[in-house]
Image (cartoon, rainbow, N blue to C red):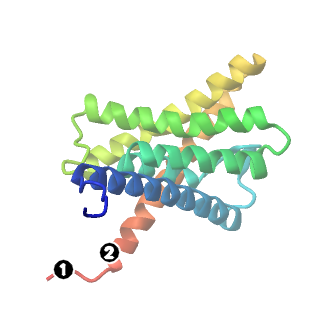
């Protein structure tokens, strides 16, 4: 009698490969977000309008790019990294605020991504993502994330500074996202051309 062997199931291997790729996307998104947060601390140590609201916020580039490039795994990576950042750096001693900030940081850009797919006709493969469409996504994202953050502030303690806090957060997120996009574009231009 031959030894028992599990049946060779390509669908099982494909599912395992997809799961491994999704996990790599989550970890890569976390590393990108946290790397940008440390770069933010180094380059712009004194540009906070108030705690958690900056005039420029580089991790906003990860908030935009990770869900855009990786979909749900990118959003999950941003969520986990935002929680880490909130608990250990931005809001130590305020776990509820860190939790809500992380959810807002990940959910708002993911919803913009879904909006781009369903309403703007963007393909999940990004094959039809143009510079123009990307620049349209930046302000959508730049408003969605601060809106969700400030909605939570209002629901949690009834106070929200829309005139200043929301406007500064939106501007900071847009500037941070644009800075990251153009820095990556400049880095890609340094790569040797194919062919």
178 sits left or right of 68 in the view: right
Residue 169 coordinates in the image, percent (x, y): 61, 39
For residue 194, the mark is 1
Query: Number of numbered discs present?
Result: 2
Q: Residue furthest left?
A: 195
Question: Disc 2 vs disc 1: which is toward the camera?
Answer: 1
Task: Give the residue drawn at x 69%, y 50%.
Answer: 84
Q: Position of residue 18 (x, y in %)?
A: 34, 52
Q: In the rendered image, which quarter is residue 164 located in?
A: top right
Where is residue 31, by image quadrant? bottom right
Tell me the residue at 38%/71% (across/down). 186
In this view, 38 is above or below 85: below
Residue at (54% x, 53% y) in the render = 176
Q: Quadrant of residue 3?
A: bottom left
Viewer can see residue 143: no
Q: Is residue 31 left or right of residue 181?
A: right
Residue linked to disc 2: 189
Q: Indicate whether 116 appears above or below 185.
A: above
Residue visible at 66% across and 36% down in the picture: 101
- Could you tell which of marks 2 and 1 lies nearer the N-terminus? 2
Secondary structure state at the residue bearing disc 1: loop
The Cα atoms of the two marked residues, 2 and 1, are separated by 12 Å
176 or 151: nearer the eye? Answer: 151
Label 2 element class = helix
Q: Residues within 10 Å of mark 1 (few under 14, many from 20)?
A: few
Q: Position of residue 75 (x, y in %)?
A: 48, 43
């Amino acid at each position: 009698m031959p030894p028992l062997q599990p049946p060779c199931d390509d669908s099982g291997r494909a599912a395992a490969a997809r799961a491994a790729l999704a996990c790599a996307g989550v970890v890569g998104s976390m590393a990108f977000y946290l790397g940008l947060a440390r770069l933010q601390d180094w380059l712009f140590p004194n540009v906070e309008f108030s705690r958690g609201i900056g005039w420029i916020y580089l991790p906003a580039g990860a908030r935009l790019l990770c869900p855009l490039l990786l979909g749900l795994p990118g959003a999950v990576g941003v969520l986990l990294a935002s929680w880490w950042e909130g608990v250990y750096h931005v809001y130590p001693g305020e776990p509820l605020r860190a939790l809500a900030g992380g959810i807002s940081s990940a959910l708002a850009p993911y919803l913009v991504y879904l909006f781009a797919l369903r309403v703007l006709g963007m393909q999940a493969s990004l094959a039809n993502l143009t510079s123009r469409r990307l620049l349209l996504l930046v302000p959508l994202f730049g408003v969605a994330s601060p809106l969700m953050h400030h909605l939570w502030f209002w629901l949690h303690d009834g106070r929200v500074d829309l005139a200043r806090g929301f406007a500064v957060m939106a501007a900071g997120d847009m500037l941070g996202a644009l800075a990251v996009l153009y820095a990556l574009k400049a880095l890609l231009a340094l790569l040797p051309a194919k062919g």
